[in-house]
Amino acid sequence: MTFLNYVLSGISLGSIYAIIALGYTMVYGIAKMLNFAHGDVIMVGAYICFFAVTRYSLPPLVGVLAAMAVCTVLGILVERFAYKPLRTAPSLAVLITAIGVSYFLQNGAQLLWTPNPKVFSSVVGTGRLALFGGQLTVSYVTITTIVSCIVIMIALTWFTGNTKMGKAMRACSEDKGAAQLMGINVNSTISVTFAIGSALAAIAGVLLCSAYPTLVPTTGSMPGIKAFTAAVFGGIGSIPGAFLGGLLLGVIEIFAKAYISTQLSDAVVFAVLIVVLLVKPAGLLGKQVSEKV
Amino acid sequence: MKHTARKMLTFAMVLTLLVSLCSVFALADGDGAFKVGGTGPLTGGAAIYGNAAMNGAQIAVDEINAEGGIQFELKYEDDAHDAEKAVNAYNALKDWEMQLSLGSVTSAPANATSAENFNDHIFALTPSASAPTVIDGKDNVFQMCFSDPNQGGASAQYISDMKLGSKIAVIWKNDEDYSTGIRNSFMDKAEELGLEVVSETTFAAGNDTDFTVQLTSAQAAGADLVFLPMYYQPASLILSQAAAMGYEPKWFGVDGMDGILTMEGFDPAMAEGVMLLTPFNADAEDDATVAFVEKYQELYDEIPNQFAADAYDCIYAYKQALEAAGATPDMSAEELNSLMIEQFTSMTFDGLTGSGMTWDETGAVSKSPKGMVIQDGAYVGLGTDAE
Amino acid sequence: MKNKSLNRNARKNFVTYGLVIAAYAILQTMSATGSMSSSLKGMLVPICAYVVMAVSLNLTVGVLGELSLGHAGFMSVGAFTGVTAAMSLQNIVPSPILRLLIGMVTGAVFAAFAGVLIGIPVLRLKGDYLAIVTLAFGEIIKSIINNLYVGVDENGLQLSLLTNKMALADGGKIIINGPMGITTIEKLSTFTVGFLLVMLTLFIVFNLVNSRSGRAIMAIRDNRIAAESVGVNVVKYRLMAFVTSAALAGAAGTLFAMNYSTIIANKFDFNTSILVLVFVVLGGLGNMLGSIIAAAALTILPEALRQFADYRMLIYAIVLILVMLITNNPVLKGYMDIIKGKLTGRAKKPEGPAPEGGAGNGK
């Protein structure tokens, strides 16, 4: 039973990584950029929800919607002012700008909301579902997170497969130049991608803080890096890959703590990652694109 | 094209460099006040501690200056909880012609700045850098807080004396010197006293969100008391996750736990029954504490933690020592250094964080920690007759 | 034509050497005459260390064309092994400068070894997958050193992992103490040693880049398949660049660590790797002089912004974003070209190797 309990807590942790990784991977898949500020957008979303629910006593659903609205606007603004002017610039220039945005959001949050930690109250309650007469328990947050992940995955897959905008996104992802020639507005397509990615970040932020309720301006940075790792693990750009990568990373992390050493768990997690990438150089579900000569 | 851009950038950077050089040259002037400087994390993940210390010290400086006797000028520089930046911050304070130092707020940067204090003969009294290495081998660096070993040993002693638990679990943060230092001395003392430690698990900066494994291990080993040598942020997560698991041991914390009740949105019921040793209690009813807490709340809109109280005490301790030594603001840092060493090793100081405090030559403070227990969302003193 | 471009490269390299020497001479004079603030004086050694970090990372990112997010990991390996060497020889080698040099060489050797170790998986991967492996490497190093205890006594070095299990003889001392890191470092680093390390780094990097090997490395960056098809040993040359870069970072780590009385493993985290990457990108990929200036300017900038107190890091972030936007703005670039054209009276010639091939190429 202890083993199963560890599996369940691995899945809880992993589901959080997964939902953050979905946003990472989607933006990467289409805009081909590592948005290092994603973790900080998550933090902003969590703060907005916190203020709505705790300070202004609004219902949790309103808090989540407010967080999504603010993050979407924030995502569009950041994209418009920081990333859009760099559309033709080398990818590393965009990467550095994203890091600048990340610093900006963290320090801005600290000035606006002070560095004092806030305790986030879970939007879905702190209850747990008991199985097998209480020997196994799963928190509602975990269930909500996994359901959200699956819904988001299906929605994203449907959106990119069936809508006009979604198809345009896939075209941009394949070949920006050719997409342009086909009459697709590459610029606005990428902007929409960021808007969606930021809305996802808001949901991830709310769920992250519902599961692990301490909220500080740096809340998003470490989960952001872990989620980025998860996205690469699963094959960056692949939506199911992000989900799988997130869950696996969570389970490996809990197992490493439980069965190897709590002290060296991070080292073990990253060592597993390296080994997996050696065997599958494009991640678990990533496409191995053969080079054209 | 690219070449031009690079030229431009080079030009811009050379310009920045020049401007920067000019600004580091600007020196401040003195005006009949003792210049007291300190470094602390004012930005970044540990910013709460640095800001608290800065605010606490500022309140003391304002009070003393209003009295009209000794005058202080206080300057805090940001070190972002990093040794390299702390040395930079320290050097900036030196350029400002700092006469007395408040060292650094956190231990890792303080290890670096205290060595500088020692080399430059600038006296330092750190409010909260509690690692023994901060003062080790430096005759002019003193601490206002207890040192980590002191605290770990005292905790084990307290648990043993009060028979609080028979099977003990320890969860500590293995990439932080504060937590590791307390844990090490706790373990040594526990062994000496015959306390049974049944589970010992750790976490680190990157994985400080999920504590299922640590708590499951403690529960499975049948621990009836869990010792948490850590700051209150991870502690609050541990408490809430244990509550969700239905695990209800006794909890024993350290002074870093102070502040848990002031977290916005924290449910005090979570911390019900948590015991901790802390030198400062914002709910204490003596006049000095009440006045300080009121003033702090009025100015900064939050309840002060022990960092603020320690820094407040540092300034008053300086005042007492300077008055006793008959020091004047025109003295050099070096002259003040020897006067302060003399005073601090001989004086007795009463402050918010303890009364009858004395210092030995190593710079360690001697004061007795107060045992506290959280009841109905407030600290209640744990007398020796408790339990 | 080929000769001409070689000459231009050589001239550029000499300009870089010259500027570094001139900067050293000026700063040293200022320091000697006492007209330098403590702030600046305290930053001289770290600036040298960051310059070496930036130039060596530029070799990986700019010349080899692979994005590395774990350069601080090599710095960490170098710092901890180098300091351990220097500290354990305290009683055997009396000369402090010699101890520092031994420390730096040890740091470089161990970092090079780590470079080989991590270089093997790196060779199998490309682009962002490679980046994540380097990131993972940095995290692993951090995690291990945080749990490493090293002590020295008359019987030599003792090591233990996870907890301090060492039984040191009398007179022995702990060097690396887990998360507390090393707390009793002798401050041996000096600006002059830092300057010499910068010069040595430039010498190694320039010679590598302008050699047959360097051209092979750049050929791999520009088109791996083409390079392979003309018989360039891809594995060998990629490893060569990667390991050289790691070794230099290791020496820089020792230099950096021995400038402070304390060093902890968490100092060399992901953020430090990113910081150095920012120097490289800002200075221009493949442009060593740019890296030097960017490293110096961006180390001083946050200090110069101290007067803005709380807003300091916010301003730093804004400056970072603006610099990237301005230098990549096509309109401004064109405008600058016109001005430059008018000033010099001739059209611009295309540069030698395309320096901005960057990571993520070879798709």
Image (tube, coloured by chain):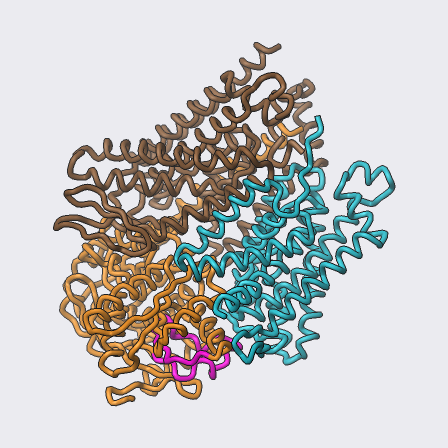
Chain colours: A cyan, B orange, C brown
Q: Quadrant of residue C53?
A: top left
Q: Position of residue C52 (x, y in %)?
A: 42, 33
Q: Which residues are magenta?
A: B247-275
Residue drawn at (67%, 18%) of the image: C345
Q: Nearer the viewer, residue B135 or C357?
A: C357
Compared with residue C224, is residue A151 higher up or lower down, i.e. above or below?
Answer: below
Give the x, y percent position of residue A15. 60, 62
Residue B237 visible? The answer is yes
Q: Is residue C121 above or below residue A9?
A: above
Q: Which quadrant: the C terminus of chain A? A: top right
Q: Is residue B249 magenta-colored?
A: yes
Q: Number of marks in the image?
A: 0
Q: Is residue A10 above or below residue A58?
A: above
The image quadrant of residue C344 is top right
Q: x, y (%) of residue C323?
A: 60, 42
Residue beneath the point at 70% across and 61% down: A199
Dividing the picture into quadrants, the one containing residue A67 is bottom right
Q: Residue at x 37, y 80 (%)?
A: B250
Q: Is residue B61 visible?
A: no
Side of B194 where C22 appears, left or right = right
B26, B242: nearer the viewer? B242
At 30% from the left and 56% from the top, the residue drawn is: C163
The relative height of residue C321 versus residue A291 in the rendered view (above or below) is below
Along the viewing direction, whichever of A245 and C210 lies nearer the viewer: A245
